[in-house]
Amino acid sequence: MLSIRNLHASISNKEILKGIDLSIPSGQVHAVMGPNGSGKSTLSYVLAGRAGYDVTEGSVTFNDMDLLKLSTEERAAAGVFLAMQYPVEIPGVTNMMFLKTALNAIRKAHGESELDAMQMLKLLRSKAKDIGLSEEMLKRAVNVGFSGGEKKRNEVLQMAVLEPKLCILDETDSGLDIDALKIVADGVNALRSPDRSMIVITHYQRLLDYIAPDAVHVLAQGKIRKSGGAELARELEEKGYADYGCEAA
Amino acid sequence: MTLAAFIDRSRKDKEDWKYTDLNALLFSSFPRKRESIASDSEHKSQLPSNYSDCSADNRARLVFLNGVWQPTLSHFATVPSCILMGDLESGYELTLGEQTCLVAQPIELVFVTDNDAPHEIDLKFFIDIGANGRLTLLENHRASNAITTIETDISLRPHAKFVHGKIVQGGAHLATAKAHVATGGYYNNFSLLRGGMPIRNEIDVILEGEEAQAALNGVMLLRRAEHADTTTHLLHQAPQCASRQVYKTVLDGKSRGVFQGEITVAPDAQKSDGYQLSRALLLSDQAEMDAKPQLEIFADDVKCSHGSAIGCLDEDALFYLRSRGLDEASARALLIKAFVTETLEEIQIEEWRVLFRREIETWTDAQTAREKK
């Protein structure tokens, strides 16, 4: 599904990723854990194709495609989805309109017919209900006035509607209380499927109590320092990142 | 007021005309494309096309060709044909008696030009609305090759209400509207300015009686070398009056937008409530926006605020939309529409909101099409 080889990336000539190697088979959930400043968010932005991140070396292959050659929207159409750490507020655009435009853009890219207003409404209502978002939230401007938990749930809603192949969850647990965390994790777990892979980026082990990973990778100083099973996350929780040349977080 | 008179004013009051230079209009040969329009049916094709499809029978439409009112081309619906008096020379008078209500039948004034248009068309309107009268009026100025000047004098008697919309689709357009609002009266102005070679839209409101209110809103959409200037003067003369202004400008190419908004609160106008917001969105490095908010407050018990912001499209929002599958041009168009939408929400008449939204979408869609090329 996803194969990252020796990936180097810089922001304004400062190297952040220093040779990442990571493979994620179909249907698996991999956690990437690391201290602040280790390059976690940079990795997620590079995969999603954000401007301002220069890949200087290495390759990313996604379902036999050279991911790095695609534009942001082409990656979305190919099935890459980044659930943002800080979902953006867009005043003046309703959540409904946003989801509708996005889904139809992706359907169009796949050569599928666009959904009409009624089909869309039905779909969005049922998906919103699954994730516990009221219909009223669909009518409000994207993320405007949403609480931290509502914003993250809204990301999961978009994920459920757009049905991506690769979900990258960038610190989806940050700023969530335990109830909100459970709801978001339930939403994510409902989307686990044999043809969908996930990268769960997190600082803490807590989220992984709810979203059980198939593998855990430690990212520190721009490289994957160690890989293992779920037990690695618990070990990190106890010992911190000190073994990886970092100050205790 | 003729072009010469406008130019004279602009030379005398340099501060008020700091950002808009009319001299170019005087000396340049204004581009005048001549297109032959012969038959009556073709005149109709000049009417805004988006109007014919939603031409409800209850709307009165008064057509002006080269500044001359054409009763034969006009559609009165249930509005009496004597609603409008006068001629181009002496000015047109629109008088509404006390308690008369023409809200259910909005009147649209459509201004078109043809091959025989003079170089300059100078229009004058006198609008007088009696006590408790209600009027809804939309000026629709089609793009034209003539220089249009328009001077509008508005009197709102006690508790009269006037909703005054305006669309300018391009060309050289110099306008002043002066509204005197008596006790409890309400003046609402919404303008959509496109094109502009240049456009100057001046609105003066004098809140003369207690509890009079004014709401001024507008959108300017500019590209290429277009120039549009919205200048408002709001005078709170009596106590307990309220005014609200929200203006949005979108600029591309080498266009230039101007917003000058002056609120003056007279010494006796205690408990005045004034609000003003001007926001501009620059889509190009070469576009320019000049915003000059001005508050002059001589009373001590007032609530007055203003805000002005000029910015570019939010990169975070663009990335967010693109990461969800929207191509760049569509993402930009969506954000531009969203930026303008806030102002549309100020429009109280649903039908107009639809009309203005469509005008704005036409503009952003053309923008998107160009970006995709």
Image (cartoon, coloured by chain):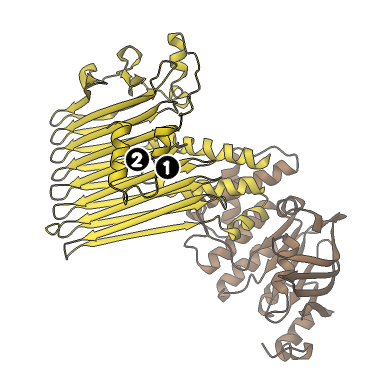
Viewer-proximal residue among A136 and B42: B42
Residue under circle 2? Answer: B201
User: Residue B108: x and y, percent?
Assistant: 33, 27
Chain A: its colour in the image is brown
Q: In the figure, residue B160 lies in which quadrant?
A: top left
Quarter of the rendering occupied by the C terminus of chain A: bottom right
Question: Looking at the picture, how far across and down is residue B321, in whole percent?
Answer: 62, 53
**Whether residue A211 is situated above or below residue B186 in the rendered picture:** below
Q: Earlier in the sequence, mark 1 or mark 2?
A: 2
Q: Report x, y in % for residue A235.
A: 76, 87
Left or right for B357, reference A103: left
Give the chain letter at badge 2.
B
Element carrying mark 1: strand
Q: Say if labels 1 and 2 share a chain.
A: yes
**Neighbour tally class for label 2: few under 14, some 14-19, many 20 plus, Cα within 10 Å:** many
Residue B228 is labelled as 1
Q: Is residue B168 visible?
A: no
Q: Residue furthest top?
A: B39
Q: Is residue A206 left or right of residue A67?
A: left
Callout 2: SS: strand
* Amino acid at pointer 2: Asn
Whether pointer 1 and pointer 2 mark residues with C-beta atoms closer than 8 Å, the reply is yes
Q: Residue furthest front?
A: B27
Relative image position of residue B281 (x, y in whole percent): 50, 52
Q: Chain of mark 1?
A: B
Residue drawn 67% across the image and 80% down it: A36
Q: Residue at x 60, y 37 (%)?
A: A116
The dot on residue A144 is none
Looking at the image, is A182 positioned above or below residue B283?
A: below
In depth, the one of B246 and A74 nearer the eye is B246
Identify residue type, mark 1: Ala
Q: Which chain's colour is yellow?
A: B
